Structure formats: C-alpha cells, structure tokens
Image (cartoon, grey):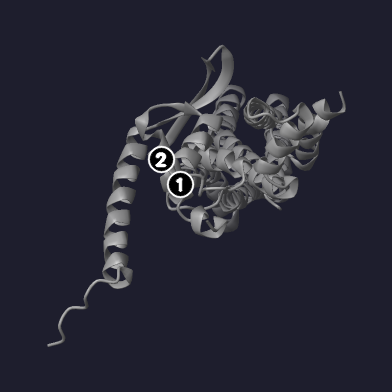
Amino acid sequence: MKSDALRGHLDALLLATLDGGQLHGYAIIEALQLRSGGALDLPTGTVYPALRRLETAGLVASEWSTVGGRQRRTYRLTKAGQRALATERTAWREFTAAIEGVLGGGPWPAQT
Amino acid sequence: MAGADVIDDYLTALDRRLRGPEHVKEDLLAEARDSLDDAAAAYRDGGLAAEDAQRRAVADFGPVNRIARDYQGLLALAHGVRTLWTLLLVVPLARVMWELNRSFWIGSWPAFDPAGPPPDWYLLIARANDSAAWIVAGAALGALASGRLLARRGWSTVKLARLSGLVAVGAVGVSLFGNVSIMIATALVDAARLLMSPPVGLASLVSLVIMLRLLVLARRCVVFSTI
C-alpha cells in the first residue's frame, strides 16, 4: 500500500490501535501490521514521531513503565483522543459509504 | 561480533543529525533502540542470523535522513514549548521583581525637575515598557494554546516549532526593545535617574542579562526548526 496514502490516515490508525488499551511503540507497530494483514509497511521509525505529535495534541499520553521486565514507553488514549477517534470513525464510514456508492459496481440509480 | 554494531551505528548516525534538548533526545533515542532491539529479536526468532536480523530491523525503521527530519521536528517543538513556558513565567516575574526592588530602594519616582514634567514620548515609552512583560506572557500563552489546537488539526511538528520560534523571537524582541528603549530614553531625559540607586541599577542589568539569555533560547527555536 502506498505510504503517501497511509500518511494521511496515520493519526487515526494510531488512535484506533490504542483503543484497546495502552501499548508500547513496537506493540503498536505490530498491531498495525497485524490488523492490516501486512499492508501497512511504512517505515517503523515514522510511527514514534507521529505518536509524540499526538501527545503534543493531547490525544495520547505516554509514560515509561515496566513491560515484560523491561522499561518501555507506553502510550494510551486520552479522553480527547477517544473523542477524536470517534469523530474519525464516523468521517471514515461516511467517506467509504460515499465512495462505495460510486466505485462499488452496483446498479446506477434510474435517471429521472 | 561484527553484526552487533548495526543498530549502534544507526543510532549514532541518527544522534549526530539531531540538535535540541538533550533529555528529549536521549528519550527519543532510547525508545528507538527499544524498537530496533524488538524488531531484531523478532527476526532472530524467525531464523535470521544476528547481523541480518539487525540489518532488517534498521531497514524497516527507515532511512536515517528521513527519520532524522521527523525526530528533529520533535526536538525543535520540545525546545519551542520550553522556551514559551520560560517566557510566560520568567518575563513577568523579572518585571515584578524589578518593580518590588525599585519600590523598596527608591519608593515613588521623584518628580522630573527642574525641567518640569517629562515629554509625552517618554511617558509613551515608559507605559509601553510597563505593558511589554504582560504582552509577552499573553503571546506565549496564546502560542501554547493555539499550538495544541493546530497539532490536532494535523500541523507538523516542524511547522509548530517554527510558529513557537516566531512567537518567541517576536516576544523577546519586544521585551528587549522595551528595556533598552526605556534606558536610552531615561538617559536622554534625566540620566541621573539611572544612577539613583545601585541596587536598582543592578536589577536593571540583571533584567537585561535575562532578556539576552531568552534571546539565545528564542534563536535556538529558529535554528532547531530549520530542517
């Protein structure tokens, strides 16, 4: 999948990945790859700056904590992040419904 | 083992390209190392040799120049935010401390005599200088609040860092200009006032040094966000 196309949706994808609970950076990358069936192949090094930018925006919070016996920086959604994710999901459903209506290949509505 | 240095080499190259607050840089690089170690371990578990696993992990992480641009944006933004907070707190505090010091050593300003009241332009400069600290604090607070909103609208860290640098340079410029202007104006109108009280004179000098230090911080905002 083209990384340019992904970049525009990276924030929403990261928020969605954190919807299930707090994760450290590499676990977020693994979750992105797993849930996309391996289609999201953007450089993993771009994920961390994106997470920090979301933190600056107040949508994500992070802290160093012990995970599996190692110190890791873990990220979680804030309340504002949960609201932003809900907005992104609604916008995405409306977008895909509109595109599906045109590209989906179904019968065209009768002309009046 | 030759391959043991692939991740180290990558992180060293990344480190060399980054300028900004050291503690933020160390934090970013520590997290990057964790990620690279995790990725290399996953490749080793998949059957790759240690060196190949590290090379794959580094390749997945991305070209060092590209990744450095993103990381530099974060560092520039961190420095910008810290500078804005410093302006917000230090400039009004320096102003209040100077006024308290002045009221303790001098009390109310004596009248301008024998030449009569000071000219209108002098009063204008004095009032502008009195307001400058609060204008600077307001600008810093506004930039911090709007920066968060703009980050939510998808502004890149580099653009946000440039905005903070612009506000910081402007704010320090206003403050420094106000300080220097009132000193020059007082020297022209009634130079004896500048030497009326050594402790107040010293406080003025300290204020000037603080402004120069803030100017250095503001300049770094611009330097760090030039990518």
Q: Residue at x 58, y 50 (%)?
A: B167
Q: Name which quarter of the figure residue B43 lies in.
A: top right
Residue B200 left/right relative to B120: right
- Check chain identity for marks 1 and 2: say if they share one: yes
Q: Quadrant of residue B48?
A: top right
Residue at 75 percent across and 29 percent down: it is B49
Q: Secondary structure at mark 2?
A: helix
Residue at 43%, 41% in the rendered image: A35
- Where in the figure is residue B158, as x and y percent of width and height? 61, 51
Where is residue B122 drawn, in percent x and y? 60, 53
Looking at the rendered structure, which numbered label has been put on residue A11? 1
Residue A41 coordinates in the image, percent (x, y):
56, 48
Label 1 Cα neighbours within 10 Å, binned few <14 / some 14-19 / many ≥20: many
Name the kind of residue labelled 1 in the image.
Answer: Asp
| Label 2 packing within 10 angstroms: few (<14), some (14-19), many (20+) | many
Would residue B221 be visible to someone looking at this image? no
| Residue with the most extreme front position | B47
Say what amino acid the circle numbered 2 marks. Answer: Leu
In terms of depth relative to the viewer, which is nearer, A97 or B199?
A97
Residue A92: x and y in percent read 32, 55
Q: Which residue is mark 2?
A: A15
In the displayed orientation, state which residue is furthest to the bottom.
A112
Please state which of residues B91 and B47 is positioned toward the viewer in this rendering.
Answer: B47
The secondary element bearing badge 1 is classed as: helix
Q: Chain of mark 2?
A: A
Q: Is residue B153 visible?
A: yes
B63 up-or-down from B211: above or below:
below
Image quarter of the C terminus of chain A: bottom left
Residue closer to the observer: B128 or B133:
B133
